[in-house]
Amino acid sequence: MDSFGKRLKKLRLNLKLTQEQLGKVFSVTNVGIAKWESNDRFPDKDTLVKIADYFNVSIDYLLCRTDNPNAKIYTGDLNGDKVEIEVNKDYPHELTPDEVKELIDNLNEVGFDVDKLIEKVKNKDNKKD
């Protein structure tokens, strides 16, 4: 199973950087990088953002919330159900968390019902048989 440390090491090796070279980028020692990669330590919030920016990946990818390096995960409540929306960074409509919440609220307003949607899809599949 992936972890922050494994993903950081993979990203570092993909750029053919040593721990010392990467440490210089983030003003930490090679020992600090080694501790991050072995999951003994974790960078602070500001450094985590810098790591994501440096490697051009999402924080959600670094934190193993998604396997897509370009995706951001947004969560919301839809009719009492927790939903997660994965938005690709390259998607032309970069959404903020507030915009995703508004989108989910609008779906609730128009009566979006996940159970009915699933039932409709399953019934459509059954009609093909």
Image: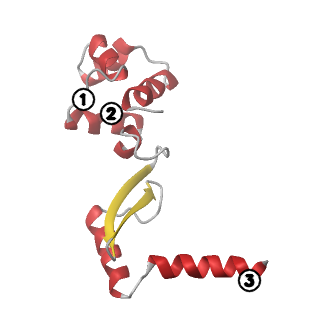
| SS type, badge 2 | helix
Q: Which residue is mark 3?
A: 127
Q: Residue furthest right?
A: 129
Nearest to the eye among marks 1 and 3: give it: 3
Question: Residue 36: x and y, percent?
Answer: 31, 22
| SS type, badge 3 | helix
Q: Which residue is mark 1?
A: 43
Question: Residue 50: x and y, percent?
Answer: 28, 35
Whole-number angstrom distance, CA of label 3 to CA of label 2 = 49 Å
- Identify the residue at horizontal 41%, vertical 42% (top origin): 61
Say which amino acid is labelled 3.
Lys
* Label 1 or label 2, whichever comes before in sequence order: 1
Say which amino acid is labelled 1.
Pro
Toward which corner of the image does residue 6 lie, by quadrant? top left
Q: Which residue is mark 2?
A: 51
- Identify the residue at horizontal 34%, vertical 81% (top origin): 108
Q: Quadrant of the C terminus?
A: bottom right
